[in-house]
Amino acid sequence: MINLYAAHIASLSIHRVGNKSRNEGIFLSSAPYKMDDEIRPLLKEFFLKPFRDKEENYFQFRHEADLEFHDLYNTVSEIFDNPERIHEHSKKITKHLFDQSMHPHIKNGEVYVAYLEGLQIDNEKVDGIGIFKSEIKQDFLQFAEQGDQLDAILQQGVNLKKLDKGALIFNVKKEEGYKVLSIDSNRYDARYWLESFLGIDAFEDENFFTKKYLKFCQDFAKDVVLPAEDKQQEVMFMNRAVNHFAKNDNFEESSFVNEVIDNPALVPEFNHYKTEKAPKYKIEDLTTFPIANTAVSAARKKIKNVINLDTNIQIKMDFINPDSAERFVEKGWDEEKQMYYYLVYFNKEEKS
């Protein structure tokens, strides 16, 4: 869980990179940018708002051999060890980004490297490094008085309401590659920012495992439970799965299987599906892990709990009170109409 409202930009360096494959150049500022009280809050909102509005999917620096060979990781570590030298290191970061700007679709733009204080992550205040890039320029009008005439002057600039690319690096978990958040609004070449420049991969913590396991369950419900039973049971399986995660602090697979899978015939199917599909979700050997409540809440919002019927009727199942859906909804077959039906019991209609 992060809180960025109390964050402070202690230092900011601004440079510019072009597209190397088009022989565009690089411009490195000789000194840090001097912010005044007017522009500082605007830049802070420009840099940090996209991360406040985005789901927290953490990454970490990763190298196939060892982190000691990861250039950006080493530069970041040097900055955290000696923040006063961030401007010189910001030039190295910008040169590194320029070297990755070889794809013809990559746009030129401004690079901002900021040292941030007062970031809060997992209830701990830490420093951080922000690396941001603006790419898309927008037209705007400036007006000037020329004698008795007001002239409109067309100019181009950066829209402070939309950050094109950004990364927040928190000074935590150094040995594991730090905790990193990333955004990329212009995903014309996602590998350029995430892989080539940042060199990051998903941070495998309780948030990661909770999300991956629930996604695995969702696909099992769609691929196995639905064909074997019906849409109601698919929805109810995910209903039970999410509620199992919501009421437990730690996940234990045998307990999960016993509580969530009603049909014993599906237990071997579940085990087989996990063996077959686990590498896709990175849960091959995962049987126990701490549960991240924020990941459960996010998953609950994404999981569909609606049964759509071909008669243009929808039945919405309640994920908060799953017993109601199981006790008061019955499925049957009408011989006369040759149609399935759902029978719903209730005492009175609730006022909306």
Image: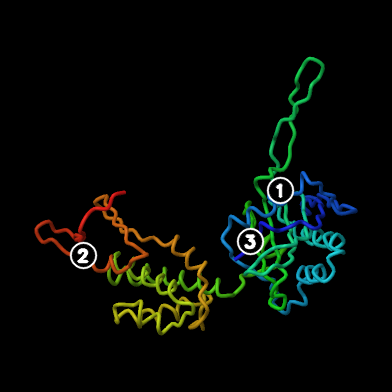
Of the pair 299 and 7, the residue shown nearer to us: 7
**Quadrant of the image occupied by residue 237:** bottom left
Of the pair 343 and 278, the residue shown nearer to us: 343
Q: Residues within 10 Å of mark 2 (few under 14, many from 20)?
A: few
**Mark 3 vs mark 2: which is more N-terminal?**
3
Circle 1 sits on which residue?
Answer: 135
Image quadrant where one finds the N terminus = bottom right
**Quadrant of the image occupied by residue 194:** bottom right
* Residue 250, position as x, y percentages in the image: 49, 79
**Mark 2 vs mark 1: which is more N-terminal?**
1
Q: Secondary structure at mark 2?
A: strand
As displayed, is residue 10 above or below residue 42? below
Q: Kindly identify the residue that appears in the image at 79 percent across and 54 percent down.
A: 20
Of the pair 336 and 239, the residue shown nearer to us: 239
* Image position of 352 (left or right of 330): right
CA gap, disc 2 to disc 1?
55 Å
* Image position of 232 (left or right of 37): left
**Quadrant of the image occupied by residue 171:** bottom right
Give the amino acid type for the residue marked by disc 2 in the picture: Lys
**Mark 1 vs mark 3: which is more N-terminal?**
3
Q: Kindly identify the residue that appears in the image at 27 percent across and 53 percent down.
A: 350
* Image position of 106 (left or right of 88): left
Mark number displayed over residue 3:
3
Circle 2 sits on which residue?
Answer: 331
* Residue 232, position as x, y percentages in the image: 29, 65
Q: Kindly identify the residue that appears in the image at 72 percent across and 55 percent down.
A: 132
Give the amino acid type for the residue marked by disc 1 in the picture: Glu
Give the amino acid type for the residue marked by disc 3 in the picture: Asn
* Residue 267, position as x, y percentages in the image: 34, 81
In the displayed orientation, state which residue is furthest to the top.
148
Q: Residues within 10 Å of mark 1 (few under 14, many from 20)?
A: some
